[in-house]
Amino acid sequence: MRTQVAIIGSGPAGLLLGQLLHKAGIDTVIIERKSRDYVLSRIRAGVLEQGMVRLLEQVGAAGRLHAEGLRHDGFDLLFGGMRHHVDLARLTGGQHVTIYGQTEVTRDLMDLREASGAATVFEAEDVAPHDFDRDRPSVTFVRDGQAQRLDCDVIAGCDGYHGISRASIPEAALQSFERVYPFGWLGVLAEVPPVSHELIYAGDERGFALCSMRSSHRSRYYVQCSLDDHAENWSDQRFWGELRQRLDPATAEALVTGPSIEKAIAPLRSFVAEPMRFGRLFLAGDAAHIVPPTGAKGLNLAASDVHYLSQALIEHFTERSSAGIDAYSAKALARVWKAERFSWWMTSLLHHFPENGAFARRMQRAELDYLVSSDHAMAALAENYVGLPY
Ligand code: APR
Ligand code: PHB
């Protein structure tokens, strides 16, 4: 097989890159380790910045999003028993975010790719990129027991944090930066109406909690938990009880509970690998960086990476110029680090850190009190939350 761009990974990064390149007449093949159904069964975040929505519109994948997505002009911060509204629209000159599950984004992009006739190989085993430090790279894999080779001009590593792309780059060529947080998020999805029409981020003494949603009848809730905890330790009843305790009385009273559809614990991590390019291998999305989920930047960062990378590759293939691909890593990283800072800050502000003493806890509270009393501080939160421009 031969293609111009071999894309490893069929998550949102790989799929969106594939469509942006397809629109520009550039041929791609996506190589994915899992099955289509498996990829579509993963439950991930659900807050889209306007920049990402525009990219989905640009490739023609925003129809269902516009019909079913929920426009949110604000969210609430809850601490000290009080809810404080963050009016995103007022603080950012009319910007908003859209609630639409990553799983749905992935489904829409997969359907579009299928309709466009571009090739995707699912259930590819032993995927390995080769010769990306030379002119003629390739990707090998095994499908149905048969060894295959895909020759290409460029490889896009869109295979997430545990993927093979970053791991194939010589260790000495990459610098990694990491912060692992001393807690996780226990998430529950349930077919119940959301407790509030907007999201609530709660910084409680018992730990962080988040009230989110997927639709007017499907809710997504999280509570901070210990890293050595297991989802099996949490009956639905225990989860709802703990969530209620982290909310103010009126919100706790309004909470509608029901059987969970999914329940899982995810660790929180900040991670960046630099640079995002080695020869003809380019990293995008979770393959290059991870943010803790507070502030919902992971999916949106994948979108901005892919925007920069698609522009660079289009320039490379249509103008035979390397200026764009040479600038890709620095351009993407400049935005990545700002989102890393924001996610780290929001995580630090709202979680209970076991190692924190009384002084650090008072500092957290003072910062929250300052934040909700100052339009300047709130505007800084709001402009990062809706997404920095790209
Ligand atoms: N070979 C082929 N495919 C692989 C390999 C491999 N060795 N390793 C992983 N993959 C696939 C995974 O199965 C997955 O489908 O790569 C895909 C990576 O997708 P994501 O993990 O979703 O990462 P990305 O596309 O960068 O999306 C950004 O935003 O909300 C966050 O972390 C969340 O997934 C989300 C991310
Ligand atoms: C979610 O709905 O899954 C979600 C929303 C906001 C976040 C993180 C996750 O900050």
Image: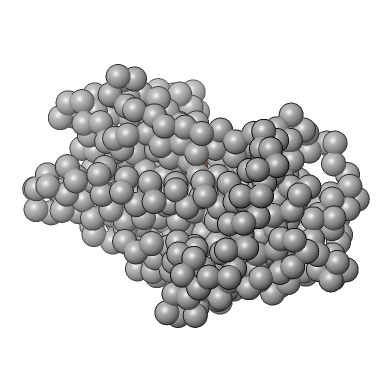
Q: Residue furthest right?
A: 237
| The one of 296 and 226 positioned closer to us in this rendering | 226
Q: Which percent across, then down, holds residue 54? A: 38, 69
Task: Tell whether 247 sits left or right of 368.
Answer: right
Question: Which residue is painted at 66% across and 49% down in the image?
Answer: 362
Residue at 39% in and 51% down: 338
Residue 278 placement (x, y as % from top left): 25, 31
Query: Is 367 positioned to the left or the right of 225 in the image?
Result: left
Q: Is residue 334 left or right of residue 264?
A: left
Q: Residue furthest left?
A: 320
Q: Is residue 94 above or below residue 298?
A: below
As displayed, is residue 22 above or below residue 332?
A: below
Q: Quadrant of residue 357?
A: top right
The residue that appears at 42% across and 79% down in the rendered structure is: 93
- Tell me if I can see residue 124 in this picture: no
Q: Is residue 375 above or below residue 233?
A: below
The picture quadrant where one finds residue 200 is bottom right
- The quarter of the image holding the N terminus is top left
Front residue of this view, candidates 12 and 342: 342
Picture quarter with the C terminus: bottom left
Q: Nearer the viewer, residue 175 or 32?
A: 175
Residue drawn at x 71%, y 69% is 83
Residue 160: image location, x then y, percent = 47, 38
